Image (cartoon, grey):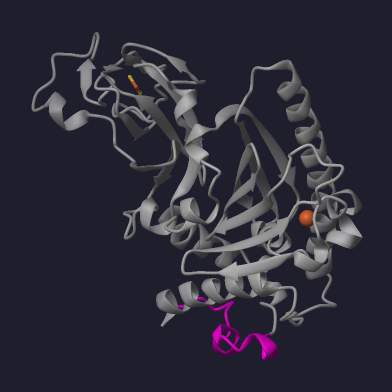
């Protein structure tokens, strides 16, 4: 496969001291965007939700990956299954919103499906010939689970999510992610290419300029980045005064290509960066905490969410300005800071490797 918008020399991975940033055209080309959807977004695990959304048999929630409607359900045997939310009759939806049911009934002409996806009944349909109901079950979607978090993939996986996340649980001890309870989901819409948002997440270089309140919480001189095969990690000790999280580290994990785990004492925040179009991105924030019931903790939670929201609006502002800068014609490639942009370098190098394996 050839992509005309990519020059071969831009795929070279230079040592970080010599590294250029990826070209502006990679953030604005429709051809590259389409390629990324099929080879990255649809070919890597995507975080879709968590156990606590579907605690009982028949509970389900809806999600979309690159516009494809997906249904995740707690099935009869208590296992979690994912299907396309697409009826095998003429493509209608089985569900229009999250809920709970014993059978799925298509909202178009009423075909019913069991929770394991098999076709149950086709009312007022016959007589038909050569119609085998067993061949008309819901189409399954690949699913995997890690620490009570649910991931799905459109194309067939080559690596499971445990392998991708290996090392995370040990690194963050004594924090245990599977203890955390889901509190709420927030969506942010950002007018930029999804990679602008990811690049921005991957460095603390902008903290002093864009996030004055966050730089009061972390210790900039001890802010570090580590990289490994499937993810990068930025971390910093928290300042022990004036923060409501308590003692410990802030860990910011980025799992290629678009998942973030933001872990602080007592709190997990999972982000999914969803490309919607070349210059539109939705970022999902799922908030989890150790204790979501006591009055004191709920007060802390609300403070945490307020601070995250403030930081997010600052990031959105800068990302939207950067998108305009990339489109301006005044910028092609910049340079990477070896001191402060290892995470960006790691992400952009991964991207080049992916492009390379599919292009040559
Ligand atoms: S499309 Fe589902 S019953 Fe017709
Ligand atoms: Fe930021």
Q: In the picture, residue 78 is in which quadrant?
A: top left
Instruction: Point out the image quarter for the N terminus.
Output: bottom left
- Please tell me in which quarter of the rendered image ligand 1 is found: top left
Q: Is residue 102 above or below residue 68?
A: above
The reply to whether residue 1 is in sight is: no
Q: Does residue 178 appear left or right of residue 302 in this picture?
A: left
Query: Measuring 36% from the left and 16% from the top, which residue is drawn there?
Result: 58
Instruction: Point out the image quarter for the C terminus.
Output: bottom left
Q: Is residue 98 above or below residue 258?
A: above
Residue 18 place in picture, x, y as percent: 68, 91
The residue furthest left is 130
Q: In the picture, residue 324 is in which quadrant?
A: bottom right
Residue 57 place in picture, x, y as percent: 34, 16
Magenta residues: mostly which secondary structure?
loop
The residue furthest top is 124
Query: Measuring 46% from the left and 78% from the top, which residue is drawn there?
Result: 2
Q: Which residues are magenta?
A: 1-19
Q: Does residue 118 appear left or right of residue 93 in this picture?
A: left
Residue 25 place in picture, x, y as percent: 68, 73
Q: Is residue 123 above or below residue 240?
A: above
Q: Is residue 159 magenta?
A: no
Q: Is residue 3 magenta?
A: yes
Q: Is residue 104 above or below residue 221?
A: above
Q: Nearer the viewer, residue 137 or 316?
A: 316
Query: Measuring 54% from the left and 45% from the top, which residue is drawn there?
Result: 174
Residue 222 place in picture, x, y as percent: 76, 66
Q: Does residue 99 appear left or right of residue 80 in this picture?
A: right
Query: Measuring 26% from the left and 26% from the top, which residue is drawn there?
Result: 117
Q: In the picture, residue 264 is in which quadrant?
A: top right
Q: Nearer the viewer, residue 216 or 74?
A: 216
The reply to whether residue 157 is in sight is: yes
């Amino acid at each position: 496969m050839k992509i005309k918008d990519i020059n071969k020399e831009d795929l070279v991975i230079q040592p970080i001291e010599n590294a250029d940033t990826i070209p502006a055209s990679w953030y604005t080309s429709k051809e590259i965007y389409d390629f990324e959807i099929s080879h990255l977004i649809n070919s890597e695990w995507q975080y879709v939700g968590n156990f606590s959304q579907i605690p009982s048999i028949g509970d389900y929630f809806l999600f979309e990956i690159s516009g494809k409607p997906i249904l995740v359900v707690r099935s009869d045997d208590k296992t979690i299954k994912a299907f396309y939310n697409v009826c095998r009759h003429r493509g209608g939806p089985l569900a229009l919103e999250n809920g709970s049911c014993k059978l799925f009934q298509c909202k178009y002409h009423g075909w019913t499906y069991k929770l394991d996806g098999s076709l149950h009944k086709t009312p007022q349909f016959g007589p038909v010939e050569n119609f085998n109901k067993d061949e008309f079950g819901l189409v399954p979607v690949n699913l995997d689970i890690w620490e009570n978090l649910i991931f799905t993939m459109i194309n067939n996986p080559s690596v499971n999510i445990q392998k991708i996340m290996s090392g995370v649980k040990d690194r963050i001890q004594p924090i245990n992610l599977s203890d955390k309870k889901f509190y709420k989901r927030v969506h942010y819409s950002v007018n930029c290419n999804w990679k602008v948002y990811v690049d921005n997440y991957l460095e603390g270089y902008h903290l002093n300029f864009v996030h004055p309140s966050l730089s009061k919480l972390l210790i900039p001189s001890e802010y570090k980045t580590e990289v490994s095969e499937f993810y990068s990690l930025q971390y910093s000790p928290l300042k022990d005064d004036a923060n409501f999280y308590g003692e410990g580290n802030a860990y910011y994990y980025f799992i290629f290509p678009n998942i973030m785990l933001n872990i602080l004492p007592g709190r997990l925040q999972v982000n999914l960066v969803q490309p919607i179009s070349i210059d539109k991105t939705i970022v999902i924030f799922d908030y989890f905490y150790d204790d979501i019931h006591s009055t004191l903790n709920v007060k802390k939670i609300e403070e945490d969410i307020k601070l995250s929201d403030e930081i997010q609006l600052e990031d959105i502002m800068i990302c939207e300005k950067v998108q305009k800068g990339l489109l301006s014609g005044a910028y092609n490639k910049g340079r990477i800071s070896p001191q402060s942009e290892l995470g960006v370098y790691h992400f952009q190098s991964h991207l080049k490797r992916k492009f390379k394996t599919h292009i040559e």
